[in-house]
């Protein structure tokens, strides 16, 4: 019996190693550039993934201009910080492009993360309130799984705020870590509710909150 028990134990151990290897080859990825305050969004994203008990790491692709103190904060949140080289589009293609969109070309470097079998890219201003990714079956998803805030005033009839699982804080002035409520549409009660939810759910320390904000959320 002892050899059989040992054999089964070895099989279980081997399967465990294979499972761990499979997990390690999957990741969430986000992108960070510059010395601005977007790192606060990455902190919120990392906390959000922990809240939903994600089994996969958050890899942060950073450009060389991201300061070391920002990188240190991200590592303290469990992020895997990986520096990438910028990608520049041809000069004759950028004369009408905003600098922000030129920077986004560097996200193409994520395709070089070949050590991962599968990755999910998430902008730093997204919050996942449900561990919904890495499913085996892919299908179109309703707006509650990617609420773009402009839907609140453009198509309110299509929004069920209480049912929302994933929020994309992409409207001008909606970033929770720098929210003031002064920009267009940002004084709406539904916007305030979502900003408060971002802060309260992830318990960000006061130093992470926008010191200039007139909206009491920290």
Image: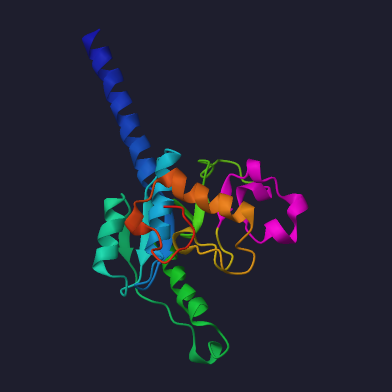
Q: Is residue 61 left or right of residue 104?
A: left
Of residues 205 and 29, which is closer to you in this image? 205
Give the total number of marks visible in the rendering.
0
Q: Is residue 14 left or right of residue 110?
A: left
107, above or below 88, in the image: above
Can residue 115 be seen? no
Residue 202 location, x and y as percent? Answer: 42, 46
Can residue 195 be seen? yes
Q: Is residue 126 left or right of residue 156?
A: left
Of residues 87 and 147, which is closer to you in this image? 147
Residue 122 location, x and y as percent? Answer: 49, 57
Residue 215 location, x and y as percent? Answer: 49, 59
80, above or below 108, in the image: above
**Residue beneath the point at 39% across and 47% down:** 47
For the N terminus, the image quarter is top left
Is residue 161 found inside the magenta-colored segment of the image? yes
Q: Name the outermost residue toward the left.
A: 2
**Residue beneath the point at 69% across and 45% down:** 160
**Residue beneath the point at 34% across and 38% down:** 20
Is residue 125 found inside the magenta-colored segment of the image? no
Task: Report the magenta residues as a range.
Answer: 141-168
**Residue beneath the point at 43% across and 57% down:** 29
Q: Name the outermost residue toward the top.
A: 1
| Colour theme | rainbow
Residue 128 location, x and y as percent? Answer: 51, 47
43, above or below 34, in the image: above
């Amino acid at each position: 019996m002892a050899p059989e028990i040992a054999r089964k134990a070895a099989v279980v151990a081997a399967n465990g190693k294979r499972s761990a290897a499979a997990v390690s080859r999957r990741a969430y990825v986000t992108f960070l550039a510059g010395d601005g305050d977007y790192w606060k969004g990455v902190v919120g994203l990392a906390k959000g993934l922990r809240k939903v008990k994600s089994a996969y790491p958050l890899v942060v692709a950073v450009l060389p201009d991201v300061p070391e103190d920002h990188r240190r904060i991200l590592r303290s949140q469990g992020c895997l910080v990986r520096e990438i080289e910028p990608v520049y589009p041809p000069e004759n293609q950028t004369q009408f492009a905003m600098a922000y969109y030129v920077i986004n070309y560097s996200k193409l470097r994520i395709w070089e993360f070949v050590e991962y079998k599968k990755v999910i890219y998430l902008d730093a201003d997204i919050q996942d309130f449900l561990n919904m990714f890495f499913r085996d079956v892919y299908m179109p998803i309703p707006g509650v799984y990617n609420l773009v805030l402009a839907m609140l005033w453009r198509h309110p009839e299509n929004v069920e705020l209480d049912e929302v699982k994933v929020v994309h804080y992409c409207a001008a002035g909606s970033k929770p870590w720098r929210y003031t409520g002064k920009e267009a549409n940002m004084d709406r009660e539904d916007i305030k509710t979502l900003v408060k939810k971002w802060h309260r759910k992830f318990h960000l320390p006061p130093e992470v909150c926008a010191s200039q904000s007139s909206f009491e959320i920290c």
